[in-house]
Image: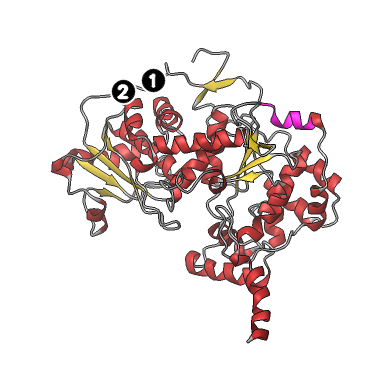
Amino acid sequence: MASLLLLLLPALFLNPLCHASPSISNESIGPKPRHSSLFKSALQRQTAPQEKIGLWMPLANQGWKPYTNSVRVSPLDGNSEGYLQVFLDGGLNQQRMGICDAVAVAKILNATLVIPHLEVNPVWQDSSTFMEIFDVDHFIDVLKDDVSIVKELPDEFSWSTREYYSSAIRPTRIKTAPVHASANWYSENVLPVLRSYGIAAISPFAHRLAFDNMPKDIQCLRCKVNFRALIFVPHIRALGDALVHRLRYPENEVDGSNVNPNKGTAEKFVAVHLRFDKDMAAHSACDFGGGKAEKLALAKYRQIYWQGRVLNSQFTDEELRSQGRCPLTPEEVGLLLAALGFDNRTRLYLASHKVYGGESRISALRSLFPLMEDKKSLASSEERSHIKGKASLLAAVDYYVGMHSDVFISASPGNMHNAMVGHRTYHNLKTIRPNMQLLGQLFLNKNMSWSQFQEAVVEGHTNRQGEIRFRKPNKSLYAYPAPDCMCATTTTS
């Protein structure tokens, strides 16, 4: 028995599954640094003082600003055609965009919008409602002159529930709305239902309104909803403010006593969104260096949850990386930031719900940036009690902190990335957009020196730090707010 115990003890103490780390999933055993040569060089990096100044400098005025409060959409018509309901699935940021579209559709139809119903998130099993995430009174007040909005249906329509529409085919439910439907489609297909029944429910609704060929007032309204009407509930904003304050004024110990964190110069910080959960890793079909066990686990997950619909699986890992289709691992995000000039005194805020691979996966990033914080490390369990187990509320806190960071970077494109890039562009804030194709090709080169890697990274991200990019056809105005949501400063807004 004693011999058996001696054999088991090392496995128990060294097993990564036994480690606990803030906001990190211990789902699988993560690998050692995959880019060991670059990683070792990054640990020994030196950053020149002038280089640091450039990193933190705010963006210069680019000649564009948000529309002012004087910009108004067409006045509210008092004769509502009926009540409009929408049912939104997806995560927080996909739902956010759906809410903006719902207001726009209500305006197109001259309908009274019922506060949108948020479906239970199938991935995170989150049942948070609109009123638990967003300040509903502020939402209604900001839009009161544009669209009629109610918190709930009147008694005569109380039968129109989510359960009612899920149990059978109903004449008041619209389930044929095409992706990126035009304004005319809604007038032709939904307006008759409103006039016949006094109510219409659209499900599914995500991405059901086009970005192109929309009336100017509808585009302005969508911008107004996204950037002015949608704010988080007070307790989310209060927690977010507390986290930002602690990042800017960290407690320091001098002779055993705490220095007042309100004194001194505010520190700067980078918010890093690591979209590296198991769902993302499986869907990308990339190899992340976790060995045979990880490959088998991701393949099984991919088959069960995606049922063979992962199109990237037809390409090799080298092909996927050279095309920029692989999300950056925590190690690769760390190497990117280090190459850009951020040193080991840089404060990072980790904006992520779960990281696939746990602490062993994220340890490389932590080694490069030891001053890394997240919700758990910055806030007490009591402060986090209102958001515990609620993925949407956790994401809302990360979004809020991300909007108040000096620099924001996302490890891969996605709804959070698009929403944050658009929102920060609207306010002219610095946001690093990783050049995924370039980085994929650089990381495939195992013989590249640190100086070569750093030079290529800096050159490849010269114009990817918040510069205005105008929206192209079919692209989201929530990710590209110029010119729909903004005006040139040389013109009258």
In this orientation, which residue lies closer to the viewer: 479 or 347? 347
Q: Outermost residue, left direction?
A: 156
Q: Is residue 211 visible?
A: no
Label 1 close to label 2 by CB (< 8 Å):
yes
Residue 6: image quadrant is bottom right
- Estimate the x, y position of residue 119 in percent, counting from the top left: 35, 51
- Estimate the x, y position of residue 177 in percent, counting from the top left: 35, 47
Compared across the picture, whether 109 is left or right of 458 comes to left
Neighbours of disc 1 within 10 Å: few (<14), some (14-19), many (20+): some
Residue at the spot 22% in from the left edge and 39% down from the top edge: 194
Q: CA distance from mark 1 to mark 2?
A: 9 Å
Seen in the picture, residue 170 relative to 72 is either above or below; the reply is: below
* Amino acid marked by disc 2: Asp
Q: Outermost residue, bottom direction?
A: 1
Q: Which residues are magenta?
A: 51-58
Residue at the spot 39% in from the left edge and 47% down from the top edge: 178
Q: Dot 1 corresponds to which residue?
A: 72
Q: Dot 2 corresponds to which residue?
A: 145
Can residue 55 be found in the magenta stretch? yes
Residue at the spot 66% in from the left edge and 72% down from the top edge: 292
For mark 2, give the secondary structure: loop
Neighbours of disc 2 within 10 Å: few (<14), some (14-19), many (20+): some
* Amino acid marked by disc 1: Arg
In this orientation, which residue lies closer to the viewer: 17 or 404? 17
- Estimate the x, y position of residue 366 in percent, counting from the top left: 68, 50
**Overall secondary structure of the magenta section:** helix
For mark 1, give the secondary structure: loop
**Which mark is on residue 264?**
none
